[in-house]
Image (cartoon, rainbow, N blue to C red):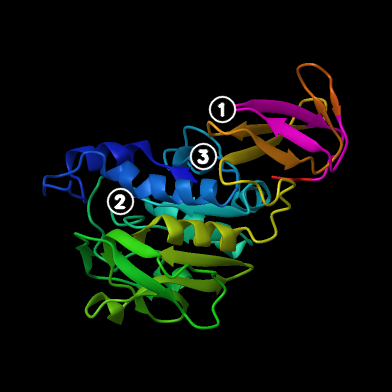
Amino acid sequence: MVYSTPSKWLMQKYPPLATADGEPDPAAYHRIFDPFYRGAFDAGRQVRIVHARQLHDPRGERTGPTPEEAVRRHPVLVVPGLYLAADSMLDWLAAYAEAGGHLVLGPRSGYADEEARARAEAGPGRLTDAAGVSYDEFSNLVREVPVRQTPGGPLDLPERATATRWADALTVADAEVLVGYDHPHFGRWPAVTTRRHGAGRVTCVGTVPGRDLARALAEWLTPTARHAWRDLPATVTATTGTAPDGRRVHIVHNWSWQPASVPAPVDLSDALNGESLPAGSALELGPWDVRVLASDDTEDHS
């Protein structure tokens, strides 16, 4: 996920979203950014947050990865709320998708230049050809709006999925509609579209996704994630990383007052006391427990 501190500061002073009582919401940036992160968390996906300037610095003060290098490091880039973006930053994102990455644009991305001046062209600025959609109008949503997936589409969208807070009036030129609004007015526009661009893809999310929509999007974006910890209880989460010696490190949490038990996906050893846990045996977790385990396998289970 791409984080933009300048965009956050701008939205603190000029929020695009409102609070429940109609006042400007100084936390607007995180109201846009956080639901995408929560969707990935709920889907059991692991997320790395990178600052926009770590990818591309328009001022040339630091050297970031080339788009081709970024594709290898980050096969999916989710970019919500990148309001302030120089032309070269947006061109870099387009080149990233063309090189084989999956670029996901959320609300307000590319709307203004690096001086916070609204772009004269239709949104998302400089990315309309790559995305296959554009918009001139947008709206605040004062309540959640149900959404529905396109029949036969790739998302597994629950019936209760919703759009929240914002809606871009996306006009499709050359893109596939994945999700639409179930609403007498907003239903004329899609909520989520996608389009092949070069060797990669650009997906536009024209709303702040509700929790179910955000999770469905995360599951679709990373369908081939080889997640070792499958079918976990609702209260248990597992994250996996690589230690300096090459071993895989698994951190398993139980977020509940009730004990939980999950099967070990591979041969594990407790990183703290050395206890062995063969694959398939039960990993016992007490209330609000956490276990740190290691395995010698090198396959990516993230």
> Helix, strand, or loop for circle 1?
loop
Q: Amino acid at mark 2?
A: Asp
Residue 171 at what x, y percent from top left? Answer: 33, 78
Q: Amino acid at mark 1?
A: Trp
The mark found on residue 288 in the picture is 1
What residue would you read off at disc 3?
49
Among the two numbered marks 2 and 1 on one chain, the one whose residue lies closer to the N terminus? 2
| Residues drawn in magenta | 277-299
Among the two numbered marks 2 and 3 on one chain, the one whose residue lies closer to the N terminus? 3
Which residue sits at x=54%, y=70%? 155
Query: How many badges with numbers are in the image?
Result: 3
Report the mark closest to the observer, 3 or 1: 1
Q: Are marks 3 and 1 in contact (CB under 8 Å)?
A: no
Which residue sits at x=72%, y=41%? 262
Is residue 180 part of the magenta span, yes or no?
A: no
Label 3 environment density (alpha carbons within 10 Å; few <14, some 14–19, many ≥20): few
Residue 212 at what x, y percent from top left? Answer: 45, 59
| Vertical position of residue 244 compared to residue 255: above or below | above
Q: CA distance from mark 2 to mark 1?
A: 46 Å
Q: CA distance from mark 3 to mark 1?
A: 26 Å
Q: Can residue 247 be spotted in the picture?
A: no
| Vertical position of residue 169 compared to residue 79: above or below | below
Which residue sits at x=78%, y=37%? 282
What residue would you read off at disc 2?
113
